[in-house]
Amino acid sequence: MKREDLEKLGLTKEQIDSVCDLNNADMAPVRAELTKAQDDLKATQEKVAAQDGTIKELNKDLAQFKDADVSGLKQKIADLEKNVAEKEAQHKQEIADRDFNDLVKDAIVTAKGKNAKAITALLEIETLKASKNQREDIARAIKALTEAEDSKMLFGEKEPREVGKKDTIGNVGSAGGDGKTETLASALKDHYSKGDE
């Protein structure tokens, strides 16, 4: 009810003020709830507007991929993962092979092997590679080769090479036995110069 309506009823100013004060007191909680509801509504509207913006952005992003072949992309990813796994396995195998070959070479040197290729050819390489104790098993296999009649000649001290003796064409050893080696041209020159004397 408005103030004018109360005046028409014949109420005094003091009575009207009292009624208005009572009315305001009664309406304060309602006004507070109304204000809170309006604030909540505004926050919800802002949240909905933000979500609408996000949805529009997502739809725009999705539009770029609408013609994309999803199954093809999945296959490419699977192929790449497989390729990476294969290369990693290959790299690990290369490292394992290198380490194994180093063990074999060291064992052959320790056993005073004369011909590493020949000795390696006599080893059961695949069995030794599969071994959990490669070092010990390689040493045992090489020891067996050093003791076997058909392979023990591959081990021991290497025979020294003769120094100063050459049998190549064009080189002739001097008859004096002084260890000097002369070329064919110088030998012929000496021969013919002696004939002139």
Image (cartoon, rainbow, N blue to C red):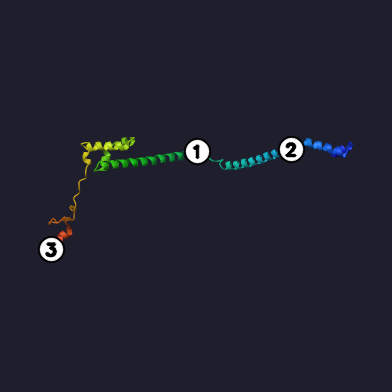
Check residue 193 in the rendering and tell me which mark sits there, or answer none: 3
User: Is residue 5 visible from the viewing direction of this image?
Assistant: no
Q: CA distance from mark 1 to mark 2?
A: 57 Å
Say which residue appears at 27% left-offset and 39% top-offset. 121
Say which residue appears at 24% left-offset and 37% top-offset. 145
The kind of secondary structure element at disc 1 is helix
Q: Is residue 160 left or right of residue 56?
A: left
Marks 1 and 2: CB-CB under 8 Å?
A: no
Say which residue appears at 26% left-offset and 42% top-offset. 110
User: Is residue 194 visible from the viewing direction of this image?
Assistant: yes
Can you name the residue that lies furthest to the left here? 197
> Which tag, 1 or 2, sits closer to the chain's start?
2
Residue that mark 2 sits on: 32
Residue that mark 1 sits on: 74
Q: What amino acid is at disc 3?
A: Ser
Say which residue appears at 43% left-offset and 39% top-offset. 85
Residue 174: quadrant of the picture: bottom left
Residue 47: x, y in percent?
Answer: 65, 40
> Which tag, 3 or 2, sits closer to the chain's start?
2
